[in-house]
Image: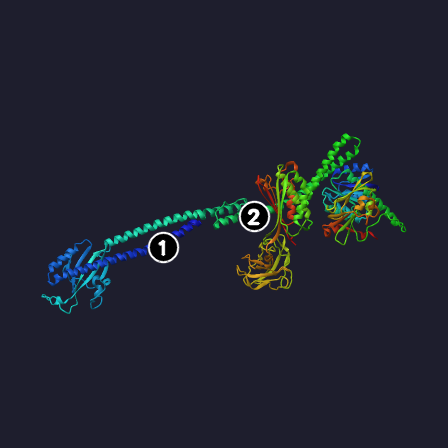
Amino acid sequence: MFNKIGFRLIFVVAFTTLIIIGVFAYFNVKSQSSNLISEVERHANQLGETVVSSTRFDMMLNQRDRIQQIINSIGTQPQIRDVRIINKVGEIIYSSDSTNINKMVDKQAESCYACHAEDKPLEQISITERTRIFRVHPDSNRVIGIITPIYNEKSCWQSDCHAHPKDQKVLGVLDVSISLAEVDNAILSSEWKIVGFSIIAIISLGLLIAFFIRRWVSRPVNDLLNGTLQVSQGNLNYTIKEMGDDEIGKLGTSFNNMTNKLAEARMQLFQSDKMASLGRLAAGVAHEINNPLTGVLTYSSFLLKRTKDNPEFQEDLKVIVRETIRSREIVKSLLDFSRQSVPKKSSAHINEIIDKAIGVIDSQLALNKVKILKQTETNLPNFTVDANQIQQVIINLLVNASDAIGKDGGVITILTKQIALAPIGIAQIKKATCPKRHSLIDNDFRIDGLPSLKVKIISGGKEGIAHLDPVYGKHRNHFDIGFKIEKDAKYVCPECSNSIVEQDKLCPICGSPVLSFEISGQGIYEVCASEQSNWERWDYVDSLGLKEYIEIRITDTGSGISKDDLAKIFEPFFSTKGQKGTGLGLAVIWGIIDNHNGTINVESELGKGTTFIIRLPLAQQR
Amino acid sequence: MSKALDILVIDDEEVIIDAVIKICALDNYSIDSANNFKTASEKISKNHYSIILCDIMMPDGDGFQILDELNNRNIDSTIIMTTGYSTVENAVKSLYKGAVDFIPKPFTVDELLSSVYRANKYQIIKEKQKLLSLQKNSDELLYVTGPAKYLRLGYSTWICQEREGSVLIGVCDLFIKTIETIQEIEFQENDEEIAQGICCASFKCGNDRIHKILSPISGRIVEVNDNIKNNPNLIEKDPYFEGWIYRVIPANIEYEIKYLIPCSSDRI
């Protein structure tokens, strides 16, 4: 449970809330109780002063009974635990608790300690020092005691009784103790209130956060997780539903984009592979079929020759010969497909190719009431293609579009434009040298069929050759040379042992040395010398910016292609035209575009129409 | 017991051998057959054949081996290649290696007969030439070879590279000598594309025979020789200069030129 992101977040938030409210409550209770205590203290002090001043007159008159009576009546108040007057020798002379009268008090006892701590008793002390809080028994309520000193006055030593000598400063003390039970109860109840409030706050905050985390984080993250699982299981058609415009929503969108691209790339790869094997199959089939066809054609044309005087046979034999020759053409187109001949490229302009293609089938389109709308960009540059093959592609696509539109007529839009796509993952290093101009290209070690870059690594007395991916941006480097590459390893040219490490430069990601290869005429290629990072830079290619393509879009207003068919339309022998077609058209088109290092994609919506998108590189790969 | 026969058919398909035998009987050729290379090789060493009709794809080897073997053994039979795997490369390669013609399968009776007819004529001319070369002081010329800078595809068509980068295409004199009088020529039009080893024109001759001309080079036709349109006999009169057929912008001459034979090698 704790490995769920939502739970962790809730836990952290609840814990923080608990600490904040706890600290707040602690200080709050503390200040509240100290306020209450000081209030009680003030009250007790006042009481002490009141008792002293109200008994003063009776003391003057030495009316001890009356003093005792006043003290008794004060002591009856419920909160007041004890009121007593102690003389200077420590004898309790008056007390609300009559059993204590005439008892001696220990000067070292708590109540006396404030003044009598030193040898000579203090005469003036502050209110806080006169106050003490204590428990009579460990389990009884707290009690606050306050001592009010009774000072000697002129009238005391001049009085008739002459009870007190003149030089005595303090005659005794009044000690009032008040029970703190009520105050303690108030503090306790406010503590409970705060605890209750904290619990409610934490629970409601947790619930609130849980709700939003579930809504904003858990559910979309689960969707994403599910999506990656689906993709890892090979279901590249899986799309994550819209998740809003926050970061996770954007992640979802880019995830969908990524799977789309992946599916597209896999499709192209799959198609490439299938074409190659089907090419071989077609060639084999063509050869096998041609032999029996030769038998049919030779015998039938032989008979045709020998039955010149028999017009009845002639008619039928002519049909056989004609149909066999038609079969011959079909097989030939199969062979044309399987061969996928190397395109014969020359400089051409896409718009001219399109115009020519339209010219070829203009009349047929007019017959079907198909209108062609050209939205061609006029200032496109010439590019190197097999104009014939591309024209063939466009004618085929136009015929397909016209067929999809049917007899009721419609519009075919042809759009051309120049676009730019990033070169990363495409540009290949074909020539690389060390500073002494030795080639660092290894034709014997190929990565994905392309000669790799080699570098000799000397580390800890061992040496080996590492191979780097020649395709910029693919990072399929081979550093596994059978021993550990230490930090002080040397990276050198295998031929002249000159270092190819760039001085004063470290990989900005992992801090490893940076290898530099001179690419003749194309600047310098830099790459991190460690497996730990994929850092690499080829300024020349980066500065070229995006690779230029000519994009051709052919859109029709026809019947569209269903999703199931869409996945199959580039497969050989797939046809929706029944008896009319061989099903080779789009497969051949695909082969032609692939031979030009281009791509072809299709977008379609049933009932609305279809768009074919062809992208041909402006500069053919050298 | 050596025999002199007109034709040896080499093919692994019985039905094709039978058909070829029947067809060639129409023109009264004597025929032998072999359904694998081993038998063929034995038969070639035993007998003499004017024409060998050979399939390129055989279970025990490919037809180019026979071409090489004949060259090595100095046997002067005329070879026609056939194959069901009729790619242009096969056609051009077999012509380069010394075959006189290439017939893609499946073929019709007329296609086979016209090819055999030319091969037969070719063989006759070659034999005559052999005889003439023995008579040292004879200045009789059986056919005219192409100018030194010309290149030819097999013995049939030639190209002449012009300064502007365009190429002239025509028919070799030897080819013309193997066909009857040209009555009509079927051309391709301006701006059409032609491909090396693929038929680019056909000559309709006497006896309703049609001879297909294989293009020596791929490219786009920029000009058709109007003079020979009106006067087909011009080809026969001046095959290498006035009798050119097409002017072509070549598409891939650097690659295709390696299958062409320089005419300079024809002069001894």
Rendered view: A115 above or below B51: below
Outermost residue, left side: A160
Could you tell whether A255 is left or right of A68 in the image? Answer: right
Q: Find residue A531 and report its horizontal and vertical position in percent.
A: 55, 57
Rendered view: A472 above or below A361: below
Rendered view: A119 above or below A308: below
Could you tell whether B125 is left or right of A135 in the image? Answer: right
Amino acid residing under circle 2: Leu
Q: Find residue B165 and report its horizontal and vertical position in percent.
A: 74, 53
Amino acid residing under circle 1: Ile
Subunit under mark 2:
A
Could you tell whether A178 is left or right of A248 in the image? Answer: left
The part of the image, by quadrant, that contains residue A91 is: bottom left
Disc 2 crowd rating (10 Å Cα; few below 14, some 14-19, many 20+) is some
Question: Tag 1, which secondary structure?
Answer: helix
The part of the image, by quadrant, that contains residue A363 is: top right
Q: Earlier in the sequence, mark 1 or mark 2?
A: 1
Q: Find residue A323 and report its horizontal and vertical position in percent.
A: 72, 36
Outermost residue, bottom side: A167
Disc 1 crowd rating (10 Å Cα; few below 14, some 14-19, many 20+) is few
* Residue B194 in view here: no
Instruction: Please tell me which residue lies in front, B172 or A533.
Output: B172
- The residue identified by callout 2 is A262
- The residue identified by callout 1 is A20
Between the C-alphas of marks 1 and 2, the distance is 49 Å
Instruction: Please tell me which residue lies in front, A225 or B246.
Output: B246
